[in-house]
Image: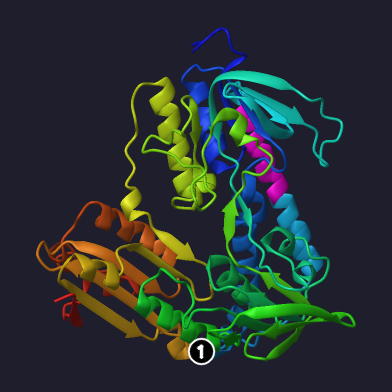
Amino acid sequence: MSDNAAYDVDLLVIGAGSGGVRCARIAAGHGARVAIIEARHWGGTCVNLGCVPKKLMVQASEYPDYVADSHGFGWDTQPGHHDWKMLIAAKDREIERLNGIYVSMLEKNGVRLITGFARFEDAHTVVTEPTPLSPDAKPERITAARIVIASGSTPTKLDIEGVDLAITSDEVFHLAEMPRRVCIVGSGYIGVEFAGIFAGLGAEVDLVYRQPLPLRGFDEDLRSALHTAIDQRGVRQHVKASPTSIRRNGDAFVVTLDSGVEIEADCVMLATGRHPKTSGLALEKAGVRLDDGGRIAVDAASQTSTPDIYAIGDVTNRINLTPVAIAEGHILADYLFAGHEREWAFDTTPKAVFFTPPLASVGLTEDEAAERGPADIYVSSFRPMRHTLSGRERRTLMKLVVDQASQKVVGAHMLGEDAPELMQGLAIAVTAGLRKADFDRTIGIHPTSGEEFVTMRSRTRVAGA
């Protein structure tokens, strides 16, 4: 199908991350002529510098726990030596394999792949320039009936003295050596997860953040339980604190906090948020407007201020999660080239943080539910069966938030082993609008942690009354 023969393609996608690839592939499947431009990594941040390599490193960091815990079950296992270089090499091989899969998927669907930096010339024209990774790539000029911007986001650095001495999540996956002392600034997903990774691999870790509890925006009970779990992981937490400078001290670095405390580390990592990647796109030439937060402003259909130009994923800074970008890309491709939309429940997007132990959440927090009216709160905290023998001080927290009027379960939260796996199933229940009575009449699987979600009978408290 040809949307407009006057253009080189019916759809041009800028950015080959998860959202851009899905949009391009589905559009091509509907018969559109599609091209996609990528400047750095096929598969985007998630595959190359985010979710996938991060989780592999989380898994690597958990093996010392397995060895220690096995002693309580009669094993005489002994800790071994961890080879950082071997881990990074194995991770790189897996990422290379996934890169190939992304490229193969696009090519099999007839999508034209272009490597280069993209820059708008006008609302229907984009030019490309070679990148350091592909210096021999020839500049191209492509015209398109419709354009999708899916350029993602990039780490935000603090404006402090010596900031260039610090790394971000872009560099952490390629460190030549395992740092023995790490100072991490920020307590969002990235900061918390890498604090757990480095601590599990044997490093001394200092975690610095401005809030009184980690993971701003999550349920307060979950945040409090995580604060305790971070302490138990051996990570030193510096709460209500911010760095004012970073300086060299021989081969090490010194981070000075606004409290006057100084932290010496071999590696300083900034996990202080991300911002939409729009620099260099020359959006003004296409009339694409940014909002006050620097993100591309879009309507409910992902259309920008310019007709026929759309934006999806992190560059719009809506819900910055890979599955959301994929959903947005799929919805947009169906809308533009098939005349229909798939339905996704964005309001009940589940999320997980892969600390050790991990935590996961779906739906409303207690505070959010209370703002809408009275909510019945059910909370359970217990020591998992494994650790009654391992001796490890680790607790699981489970929580249900129930709208009192309708008795619908509007939120579920958990910190504990397998929390992300359990929460995926609970997200279906919350999305479907199941009531607390539906949970109560469901038979549990015994003995599991998951059965606790269907056996919490006693209300802990009422919020928002």
Residue 66: where, in percent of width, then height? 59, 79
Q: Is residue 461 above or below residue 152?
A: below
Outermost top residue: 5
Q: Nearer the viewer, residue 353 or 119?
A: 119
Q: Is residue 186 above or below residue 342?
A: below
* Residue 270 falls in image quadrant: bottom right
Residue 359 shown left or right of residue 277 in the figure? left
- Magenta stretch: includes residue 101: yes
Residue 455: where, in percent of width, then height? 21, 75
The stretch in magenta equals 95-106
Residue 7 shown left or right of residue 460 in the figure? right
The quadrant of the picture occupied by the C terminus is: bottom left
Q: Residue at x 69, y 40 (%)?
A: 280
- Magenta stretch: includes residue 349: no
Question: What residue sits right under mark 1 in the picture?
Answer: 392
Q: Is residue 141 visible?
A: yes
Q: Is residue 407 above or below residue 381?
A: above
Q: Nearer the viewer, residue 3 or 181?
A: 3
Three-letter residue code for mark 1: Arg
* Residue 139 falls in image quadrant: top right
Q: Is residue 443 visible?
A: no
Q: Residue at x 51, y 89 (%)?
A: 392
Outermost left residue: 405
Residue 220: where, in percent of width, then height? 36, 77
Q: Residue at x 21, y 76 (%)?
A: 377
Q: Nearer the viewer, residue 137 or 248?
A: 248
* Residue 278 falls in image quadrant: top right
Residue 115: where, in percent of width, then height? 73, 32
Q: Main secondary structure of the magenta part?
A: helix
Q: Nearer the viewer, residue 349 or 245?
A: 245
Say few, some or many: other residues with alpha carbon within 10 Å of mark 1 (under 14 / 14 to 19 / 20 or more): some
**Disc 1, SS:** loop
